Image (cartoon, rainbow, N blue to C red):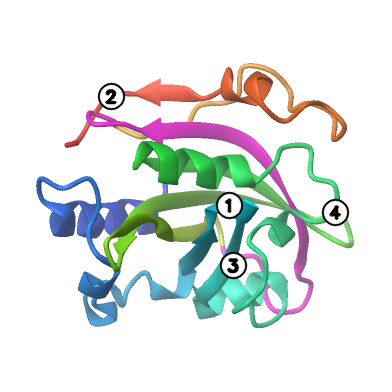
Amino acid sequence: MKHPTSRMLHAYWNGLRGARAAPERGEIEPGEIRHVLADSLILEIDAPRQSAAIRLAGTRLCALFGGELRGLSFAGLWGEAPAADPWRLIEVVIQETAGVVVGLVGVTEAGETLDLELLLLPLRHRGKTQARVIGALSPSVIPTWLGLRPLVALRTVSLRILTPEANATPAPLAAPPPAANDEPGLERRKRFVVHHGGRA
């Protein structure tokens, strides 16, 4: 993980879970992660419908996209017809009960770009491990246009899965993302980079 916010949130999450695969949603104390709240988010997962809704989003995250994100679709942050299906990121987290670190490029309507790092980590919620995800979406720098010109789309450029012994430094994808009309299944999975580290 390159961004301090990602490292701090991952360390907190890792400390809470102990020997478990994931901590409980109710164990998250906002006051203990107050330094990363501005970039943080919590997603509500509907696995049968392959959808994720944003339940909570930090102030800087909302400013990046020009408004309140609560209740909106997580996939909607990628804009219309994204080259890579955002649900695949969620699918890895909930099916593998593993975190992911994703390198992204955000784009404004004026064509300005911004490098971002996305961390997604599983949470248990009322006994289920496929119901909530906590994460952070952090810009590499704070742009001068923050709050004036919102991001209108995201592009996925790297992905790393945090398996039990991960060091989680993102790596570029092995090939360019497929066209929007490509089959979204196994071809994308072949680009996932599995790096060992941490605890199961």
Question: Are there few (<14), some (14-19), or many (20+) residues within 10 Å of tag 2?
Answer: some
Q: Residue at x 88, y 62 (%)?
A: 109
Residue 110 is situated, as x and y percent measured from the top left of the image, at 89, 61
Picture layout, residue 168 above or below residue 128: above
Residue 48's disc number: 1
Circle nearer the N terminus (4, 2):
4
Residue 196's disc number: 2
Circle nearer the N terminus (3, 1):
1
Give me the C-alpha separation between circle 2 and circle 3. Answer: 29 Å
Q: Residue at x 80, y 56 (%)?
A: 79
Q: Quadrant of residue 163?
A: top left
Circle nearer the N terminus (1, 2):
1
The amino acid pointed to by label 1 is Pro
Tell me, yes or no, whether the two marked residues, 3 and 1, touch with CB atoms within 8 Å: no
Give me the C-alpha separation between circle 1 and circle 4. Answer: 22 Å
Which of discs 4 and 3 lies nearer the camera? The answer is 3
Q: Which residues are magenta?
A: 142-166
Which element is circle 1 on? helix
Picture layout, residue 145 above or below residue 108: below
Q: Which residue is mark 4?
A: 80
Instruction: Verify whether residue 146 appears in magenta.
Output: yes
Q: Is residue 131 left or right of residue 22?
A: right
Q: Locate the C terminus and report the quarter of the image it occupies.
A: top left
Q: Locate the N terminus and report the quarter of the image it occupies.
A: top left
Circle nearer the N terminus (1, 4):
1
Residue 22 appears in view: yes
Q: Is residue 42 left or right of residue 156?
A: left
Residue 138 is situated, as x and y percent measured from the top left of the image, at 51, 59
